[in-house]
Each structure stands twice: as structure tokens, then as C-alpha cells.
Amino acid sequence: MKRALAFIVAIFLLSSCATESSQNEFSPQDMMFADMMIPHHEQAIEMSDLALAKSTSEVILSLAKQIKETQQPEIELMRTFTGENAGMHAGHTMMGMLDESEMAELSAATGEAFNQLFLKGMIEHHKGAIQMAEMVVGSANSTVSDLAKSIISSQTAEVDFMETLLKN
């Protein structure tokens, strides 16, 4: 919670310092969003790789594949405007990210216990990404704004789907 609040404060401070930018320029908050979202997406891909290796549920396997196919191109897009500095927040726990012990628990789980942990973890992970994307959805840069809208749309749909799976 403290890290989420710190992220929100940082975005607010950066946005208040930013000058008007054209649609082709990336503001400091755009860059911070991408820099934090890259490791966030990388963890979702790592979780999906675990699901692809460990789950026998066709639904979980399909979901994991979909997450990878959506988020890998988004990472590549964000790297085009963050350059070499991408992922400098990789060591920090951001909104919705699993910590080391949660990742270890997921890695050790098998069968239905794995599926349940994967779904619960990915729901929280996606909710964190949605919160981060909502902070830049109004960006003057159309690339960032469009990406944020896409993240919100796709991950909201996936959260709804995963919550339905958990109920059944």
C-alpha cells in the first residue's frame, strides 16, 4: 500500500512539473509509467510461463498464452520509448505484483492449488496494472494514451473472466 501511494504521489509530482508536450513527446509521467509497467508485465509473463509449464487446465493454459501474447508486444512498445533505462524499478514491488515469497509459493504449487493461486495472483496483478494505466490514460501522447486504454480494456476483461473462474 505504501508503495502504491508513493507511485501515485510520484506521478502527481511529475505531472505538475511537466511542460506541455506534443503528441509525439513523452512526458516524465509517461516515461515513469513505462519504466514501471515493463517489469510489471515481465512478472505477468513469468507467472504465465509457470502456468504453461505446470497447469493441466485448458482454460488456464489458454489464459496464460493470451496474457503472454498481449503483454510481450506491449513491453516491446514501451521499450521503444524508454530505451536503455527500461525497468529501473524492477527490484521494487509495484501495484499488484507478487513478492518473492508469493512467487515461490506459486512455483511450488501443483494441480488445482496452483490454478487457484495463479488466478488469485493474476487478478491482483491485473488490478495493479489497471490502476497504473488509469494514471496515464489522459496522456497527451497518443501512444501512451492508446496503450493505457488497451491495458485497461484487456485486463479488465481478463479480471472479470478470472473472477468467474474462481467462483465456479
Image: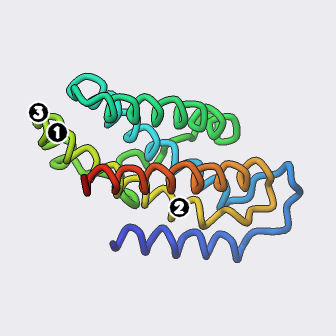
Distance, label 2 to label 1, CA atoms, is: 27 Å
- Per the rendering, the mark at residue 132 is 2
Where is mark 1, residue-wise?
114
User: What residue do we see at 40% from left, 36% from top?
Assistant: 63
Label 1 residue SS: helix
Q: Report the side of 98 relative to 86 (left or right).
A: left
Q: Residue 6, percent across and down?
A: 44, 72
Q: Residue 156, percent across and down?
A: 50, 56
Where is mark 3, residue-wise?
110
- In the displayed structure, would residue 28 be above or below residue 86? below
- Front position in the image: 113 or 47: 113
Distance, label 3 to label 2, CA atoms, is: 31 Å
Label 3 residue SS: loop
Say which amino acid is labelled 1: Phe
Say which amino acid is labelled 2: Met
Label 2 residue SS: helix
- Front position in the image: 32 or 56: 56
> In what quadrant of the picture does the N terminus appear?
bottom left
User: What residue do we see at 14% from left, 39% from top?
Assistant: 112
